[in-house]
Structure formats: C-alpha cells, structure tokens
Image (cartoon, rainbow, N blue to C red):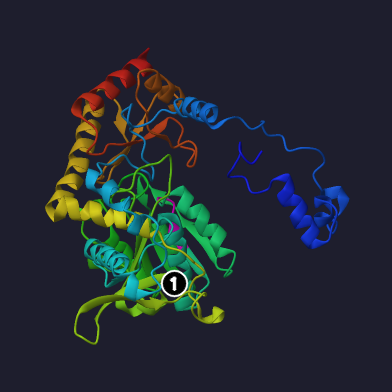
Amino acid sequence: MTATYRYLPDTKQDQEEMLAFLDISSVDELFEDIPPEIRLKGELNIPDAIPEPQLMKKMHKLASQNKNANEYPIFLGAGTYDHYIPSVVNHMISRSEFYTAYTPYQPEISQGELQAIFEFQTMVCELTGMDVANSSMYDGFTSLAEAASLAVASTRRSKVLVSKAVHPESRAILNTVAGGPGYTVEEINLAGDCTDLESLQAQIDKDTAAVIVQYPNFFGSIEDLAEIKNIADTTGALFIVSANPLSLAQLQAPGKLGADIVVGDMQPLGIPMSFGGPHCGYFAVTKKFMRKVPGRIVGQTADEQGKRGFVLTLQAREQHIRRDKASSNICSNQALNALASSICMTALGKQGIRDMAQLNIEKADYMAKRLQEKGFVVANEAPFFNEFVVDLPRPVKEVNTKLLEQGIIGGFDLGNDYGFDHQMLIAVTEQRTKEEIDQFINVLEASVNG
C-alpha cells in the first residue's frame, strides 16, 4: 500500500500506532461520546478510488460539458463580466512570492506585497474619488454588507434603506448580515429602471443609518447620485454607493458626488470569471471613517535611514483589537486578486482604462439601437453603461436555449429575481465584436418569430 499510495499517511500501521498512543483499541472509540443514533451507518455513498490518469480523463470529460466564454460569445453579466485581461497579469500573480503570500505581518520581509497592496489602495481611491481604501475584501457583496454595518455603528441608528436596483445577491447578503447587529433593512421601490426618489423621500427618517444604491445599477442604468445624496442629507443618513470600478473610468466618481462609502467588486479589472469566483471587493471611505474601515490599511512611511517603506497601518478587526471595539470580523483579504487588478490597471494605464470603458458604452449602445431597429423594446429610460434590459415576446429561458444551440450564451433572466417575465438583462463588454452582436440579434429575431 505504501508503494502504491505513497502520499496517503493513514496506512494500517499508522492507524495501529496512533491507536496505541491514544490507548484505545479501535477508531470507533474516538467517537464514543457521539450518540449512536446520529452517527453515520455504513459507508459514504462515494465512488471507489481510481488511478490518477483515469481520474484526470474523467474530470476533463466533465469539464468539457461546460459552455465557456473561450468558445462561445457571452452576453451574460449580472455581476460577473467577460473583460480583456492583459497577459502580464497571470504571469505576475503566478510568481511564487505573490502566489503563496499570506498577510504581510512582518514588513521587513514583505515590502513587495505591502507595496502591491498600497498601490491597489491608491488606484481605488483615484477611481472612486474617496480619501482612503482598504487592502481588499472577499467580494463586492460582502463589502456592501460591511459598509451597512459601519454606517449603523457610526450613526447608532437602526434602519438601512437599499434600492431594489441593487444586485439581488447583495441585498440577500445584506439581510443576512443585518441579523447580527439587529438593524432592519427596507427596500426602496423602482421607478422604471432606477431608484424611485419619491419612495426614498417617503421612507427616509431619523432612524435611517444609510441609503444604498448601485452605480451603474443592476439594470445597467446610471442613478442620479447627486439627488440621492441630497435626500440622504435631509436626515443625516450616510450615502453608500456600490460601483463598478471600470465604469468609473468614464462616469463621475461617487466621491465627487457626495458618497460617504464606496464599495464594489474588482472583477471587471483583471480577474477572470471562473464560473463565478473568487472575486475581490474594495472598500473606500472619506477620511472621517478611516478608523472604522474593516480589514487592513497599508500605509507608506520612511525607515530610520529615510528610505521609503510600507507597513500595516490600521487593522480595525477583532483579531487585532478588543472584540467590542472591532468594526468587523472580516479576517482575510483577497491580496492575490487585488494584485491582479493592480497589474491590469497598470498595464492598461489611465487612458487604456478610459478607452476600455468607452468601448463598453459604445458597444452596448450599438446593440440596443440595433435591437430597437428590429422592433424590440429596450426598457432602460436612463443612460446605461454596458448592460440594458430588453423585452421579449417569449420566456427568456426559451430564448436562451435557442441562443445556446447557435453557440451563444444569452443574457440574465429577470424573472428569476424581479418577476419581470420576458425581460432579459444583456451585457455587452469590449470583448464582444460587431459580428457577435449582429449574430445574437439575428438568432434572437429568428427565435422569437419562428
């Protein structure tokens, strides 16, 4: 057995030696404190072990059943997008000093990692127009929930208002997290494809800790941040914006429009879709809330010889300070994915990111206009970035099946989360070519008329 499975530590001899050391006669004795009625009876229902070459063939065969963006043009967005990633990104993050790095607690041997995080924070601040950003979080969804918790703790109020135009999964996580601190979450209705400002004015009061919107929102539309900020200010509520970082290369920065906290997901910049994760959340605030930011902040300093250096400056989490003083129990960051975003932004440069964002705007606009020419109704009334909603005469599921048969991954079915039957959310990134867009429209037209 040792020769055949040399990496398995629990040989029969190993087991006997461990049992003898523990002074017991069988493995079952290890579990004698567990009531028999809740123990597993029999063997686990899993396949027998097979040799590695056979296993690899089997797994490759299973993987080949997936329809992916390397083979099919994809018009599905809704939070994860097919964007160009410069080849240098993967080369850099695959270097062992980054690939295996953990939290850089020892600055004297972690200057490279610390500088990478510092640069990430700096770029996030430039994009969002905010004063301070942390070293990253799990994803945009948890970043938003952490922002709400910060607002509740800072204002000592008990209610958070969130627009229904915020990503459904963000709202789901927000409601889950709210159960801990015990604050309530109220949703603001829609007025077409944007937040209903009249509903917001009716719901906001002195108990409101924060108003949360998405920019662009889940339907791709651009919210009126300045007006929403004005409404939030009437009661002293904080203004939280969940923003697509790529869109900020062309849109006005939320920090310039009065946001107190800006969060989001860095996936559009340098992070592959990977069937839904992992991602990398960012979290940026005004200077007023710097000491309440969850996670870590890397700062720039100088050593006693005057040389530039980097250190962990603020760590307001429960692992480092008294639990009752901690702003969050987030205990990790996405340093590798944050590095991927930093390298992507550096490789593209400021103008390159602007050009990439502009292509998203122009290609989405081209597709929307072509659909309208074919008689389809585009539901968005507000300007949109790289996503928009189109009305279909047939169920979206049927249309997506027809598209897939023609080698196209279709859009998101809004009936799933909003009950908007026969409405598809279509994402058009810089990756989509004119030929792919035209093919989509031709297949769509044939599928609804056939």
Name the spot of residue 393 as percent of width and height, x first: 40, 23
Secondary structure beneath dot 1 equals helix
Along the line of sight, which residue is nearer the eye, 144 or 215? 144
Name the spot of residue 337 as percent of width and height, x first: 35, 54
Residue occupying image coordinates x 51% and y 28%: 53
Of the residues shown, which amino acid type is indicated by label 1? Ala
Magenta highlight range: 161-165
Q: Quadrant of the N terminus?
A: top right
Side of 279 where 223 appears, left or right: left
Residue occupying image coordinates x 73% and y 38%: 44
Along the line of sight, which residue is nearer the eye, 422 or 124? 124
Q: Which residue matches tag 1?
A: 151
Query: Where is 89 relative to 438, above or below?
Result: below
Q: Quadrant of the C terminus?
A: top left
In the rendered image, is residue 242 in sight?
Answer: no
**Residue 164 painted magenta:** yes
Name the spot of residue 97 as percent of width and height, x first: 33, 59
In the rendered image, is residue 399 in sight?
Answer: yes
Side of 443 where 176 appears, left or right: right
